[in-house]
Image (spheres, rainbow, N blue to C red):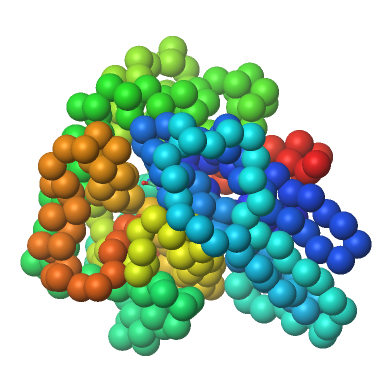
């Protein structure tokens, strides 16, 4: 579970709670820790829970167990229909051979890197191929490095970020999780922080001295950083596809794939960042029943295919190290 709580998860909401017995560990979704209109079907929440599952599976092997994972299936449903916590997966443990591997070792080093990446260094052909090994049934990974496609990706991510900051509910639901002050971080131990924003050490220090900006100003900084730093210095973008965007088990599996990919990247000296704005807009447009602009633009970008993107990311060599983000203590996430 110590490995699980270090997993990637949307907006650092840490939407998990664990129940432990002699033979198994259950992972439950803490449904109150949601992102509202940013994740109206809890699709991202389940991706994050999948990330936690992947870390637990790696840790179980490393600790000398043979883990068996059972996922709770079904369809992802709107937040309003759900409350409390709900079982998502059970890992049954029997004694096995201890098998440490480099992905397990990378768990404490993995952090989301929102700073600039080195545009002069590209992935090797072997690294590009290795990206596709980290997959699961019904999940597919694609990597894009062609200059034309990169330009389209940049435009799509910037436009999706603009659409989000023009949507008052999304800004409000996102802002709710931001932790600006040291005392808030100590109190909540979750959420995005200035340390994890990918600013230079000087800018991070200066930002900490300023009062908390308004939600609108904060999200305008986010758009600026997305446009001028994050997509501007991305040597490669990637997508993770699933057969069914609102299938719960597939969201969990896609989360496992993301976590595994990110850990693998760390072993290569590479770094990564999700840039999931276009797919957050796909969910939001569906929730509002408006034109599916971003679903169409994703199809235009990657061609008509039977599966759909659930996760977008960039990958490259880091220029600066990424900082860890806070986590709630183990005692706070067990019942
Ligand atoms: C489903 C999902 C979506 C995410 N979307 C974004 C994103 O759009 N932009 C971003 O900078 N980080 C994104 N993240 C990264 C999380 O914010 C990050 O994992 C979390 O804050 C914990 O920090 P860590 O990864 O450094 O441990 C996403 C993570 C997940 C699992």
Question: Does residue 202 appear in the picture of this structure?
Answer: no
Is 281 left or right of 57, judged from the image as shown? left
- Residue drawn at x 64%, y 45% is 86
Q: Please, is residue 213 above or below residue 34 in the view?
A: above
> Picture coordinates of residue 110 (x, y %)?
55, 58
Q: Please, is residue 169 above or below residue 29 in the view?
A: above
**Depth order, front residue of 114/72:** 72
In which quadrant will I find the N terminus?
bottom right
Q: Please, is residue 107 above or below residue 97 in the view?
A: above
> Picture coordinates of residue 36 (x, y %)?
42, 32
- Residue drawn at x 57%, y 46% is 324
Residue farthest along the right direction in this orientation? 22
> Picture coordinates of residue 37 (x, y %)?
36, 33
**Depth order, front residue of 289/6:** 289
- Residue drawn at x 49%, y 28% is 177
- Residue drawn at x 13%, y 70% is 303
Is 169 left or right of 93, judged from the image as shown? left
In which quadrant will I find the C terminus?
top right
């Amino acid at each position: 579970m110590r490995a699980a709580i270090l997993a990637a998860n949307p907006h650092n909401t840490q939407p998990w709670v664990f129940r432990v017995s002699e033979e198994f560990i259950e992972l439950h979704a803490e449904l109150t820790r949601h992102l509202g209109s940013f994740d109206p079907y809890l699709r991202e929440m389940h991706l994050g829970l999948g990330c936690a599952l992947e870390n637990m599976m790696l840790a179980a092997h490393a600790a000398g167990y043979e883990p068996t994972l059972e996922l709770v299936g079904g369809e992802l449903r709107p937040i309003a229909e759900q409350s409390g916590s709900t079982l998502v997966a059970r890992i049954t443990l029997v004694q096995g051979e201890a098998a440490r591997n480099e992905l397990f070792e990378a768990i404490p080093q993995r952090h989301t890197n929102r700073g600039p990446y080195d545009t002069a260094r590209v992935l090797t052909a072997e690294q590009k191929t290795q990206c596709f090994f980290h997959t699961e049934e019904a999940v597919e990974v694609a990597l894009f490095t062609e200059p034309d496609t990169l330009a389209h990706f940049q435009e799509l991510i910037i436009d999706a970020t603009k659409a989000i900051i023009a949507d008052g509910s999304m800004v409000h639901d996102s802002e709710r999780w931001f932790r600006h002050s040291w005392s808030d971080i100590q109190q909540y131990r979750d959420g995005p922080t200035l340390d994890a924003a990918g600013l230079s050490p000087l800018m991070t220090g200066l930002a900490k001295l300023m009062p908390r900006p308004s939600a609108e100003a904060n999200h305008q900084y986010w758009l600026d950083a997305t446009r001028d730093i994050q997509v501007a210095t991305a040597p490669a973008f990637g997508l993770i596809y699933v057969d069914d965007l609102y299938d719960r088990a597939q969201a969990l599996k896609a989360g496992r794939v993301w976590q595994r990919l990110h850990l693998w990247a760390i072993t290569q000296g590479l770094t990564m960042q999700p840039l999931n704005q276009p797919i957050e807009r796909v969910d939001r447009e569906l929730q509002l029943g408006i034109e599916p602009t971003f679903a169409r633009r994703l199809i235009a970008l990657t061609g008509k295919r039977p599966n759909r993107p659930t996760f977008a990311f960039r990958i490259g060599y880091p220029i600066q190290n990424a900082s860890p983000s806070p986590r709630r203590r183990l005692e706070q996430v067990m019942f």
